[in-house]
Amino acid sequence: MLEKVGTDCSRCGACVQVCPAGCISMDQERAWIDSEKCLHCDACRKHCHLLAKVSLNTVQKAYAAQAEDGSVRSRSASGGAFAAIARSFLEQGGVVFGSAWQEDWRAKHIGVESADALFKLQGSKYTESDTGDTYARVKQALREGKPVLYSGTPCQIAGLYAFLGKKPEKLYTADIVCHGVPRGELLAEYIAYYEKKHGCRVTEWNFRVHKEGIQGCLGRITYEKDGRIKTVPMLWNCDTYYYHFMHGLCYQSRCYTCPYAQRQRTGDVTLADFWGIERLFPHRVGGNTSLVLVNTEAGAGLLAQCRGLQLTEADTEAACAQNGQLNAPVKRTAEKDRFEALYVQGGWGAVERDFLKKTRLQRLKAQAVYRIPAGLKKQLRNLRRR
Ligand SMILES: Cc1cc2nc3c(=O)[nH]c(=O)nc-3n(C[C@H](O)[C@H](O)[C@H](O)COP(=O)(O)OP(=O)(O)OC[C@H]3O[C@@H](n4cnc5c(N)ncnc54)[C@H](O)[C@@H]3O)c2cc1C
């Protein structure tokens, strides 16, 4: 017999990792206890962040942040704040945990101990990242006296605290502002669909690349076909998966009522895109910028030890007001139900046929805008602002 751990579940995996009987498994939505193997110790419920609510932190300071090294920025989703903070942390003998791609295009949390491996954690993977056994590995590293920096979605950070039962002194956390996460197999199945459709093998799937003149989300796909390597841009409003991600149509059900999509944060620092930066700093020039929120003293310490990161203090209220997911979770709409129905009916093929039909004009416009040279785009933007 299977029994729920709690009514709500964020699939953080704390209960799976804490269970002494190994009797908890996860389906697409939640964790289940195998009651025949259960020892009735209740460890799973005691360590569930949704049942034993974790305390949240109030934002103290906000910064616009850019890694000084352009090669660090180019691998990152926004300004490279994560990599700059993590690199300095590693140089001081710490271990850094975060999300990395697996060979099957699923994301999984891993730990790295050297700056050479940091690239694996850089960049946004717009899919659920499996925490695997990383909470237990954090506990082990802390026991060995190593400082640990753990990064992930706010619910994964809450799950880690609940797993550990407290916030140990040498543990530092960075939560990312999160729009929502689709279940892992959706992206893996979409890339398989893409490969079949194009008769190719995908070697790079990057949701966020930087291109002069492009503000917002632009990705890049690299694939191998007939012995040749080809790279193509992935415009969020022209790619079926990216469109459904950005419109919040393919997230897991719990994301639409996420208790952490707000100003009170789980992490010592919060990392986000600095949306609306042109309004706050109209004279600032050049490239994508991270928003870094400092939420605790430990977070202030993380920034103080960080080298290679340009920080400009911003007005906290104004910076947070511009970022949707610092204010409320994404709304669940009828379009989400439509996506689910189409997906059940015919997988990505059915979803894509519907997408192509309803977005014809929008896609033409996006492709035309993409082709306008960066300089001209800037002039047009300036004209519009006058
Ligand atoms: C699913 C998702 C949704 C997001 N939604 C928003 C949003 O609505 N608004 C906003 O301002 N920012 C959002 N972000 C955050 C943003 O894209 C950048 O990650 C953030 O600005 C940090 O960028 P960076 O340049 O400092 O570092 P980067 O190198 O880009 O970030 C790497 C960090 O992201 C973590 N990470 C990457 N993918 C995942 C994942 N699937 N699960 C858990 N952790 C992951 C890594 O562990 C690492 O800590 C989202 C990120 C993800 C993964």
Image: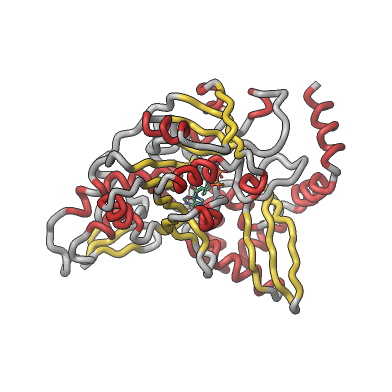
Residue at image point 50% right, 63% down: 106
Q: Horizontal and vertical percent for residue 299? A: 41, 33
Q: Is residue 337 visible?
A: no
In the rendered image, the vertical position of residue 261 relative to residue 312, given as above or below = below
Q: Residue furthest front?
A: 92
Residue at image point 40% right, 61% down: 28
How is the protein colored in the picture? secondary structure
Q: Quadrant of the N terminus?
A: bottom left
Q: Horizontal and vertical percent for residue 6? A: 26, 51
Residue at image point 85% right, 43% down: 373
Q: Horizontal and vertical percent for residue 69? A: 64, 43
- In the picture, measured across the screen, residue 226 lies left or right of residue 258, that is right
- In the picture, measured across the screen, residue 83 lies left or right of residue 198, that is left
Residue at image point 67% right, 50% down: 209
Q: Is residue 304 visible?
A: yes
Front residue (pair 366, 309): 309
Front residue (pair 211, 113): 113
Q: Quadrant of the C terminus?
A: top right
Front residue (pair 202, 311): 311
- In the picture, measured across the screen, residue 177 lies left or right of residue 281, that is left
Q: Horizontal and vertical percent for residue 64? A: 58, 30
- In the picture, measured across the screen, residue 349 lies left or right of residue 109, that is right
Q: In which quadrant of the rendered view does residue 168 lie?
A: top left
Q: Residue furthest left?
A: 40
Q: In which quadrant of the rendered view does residue 213 lie?
A: top right
In the rendered image, the vertical position of residue 63 relative to residue 210, given as above or below = above
Total residue callouts:
0
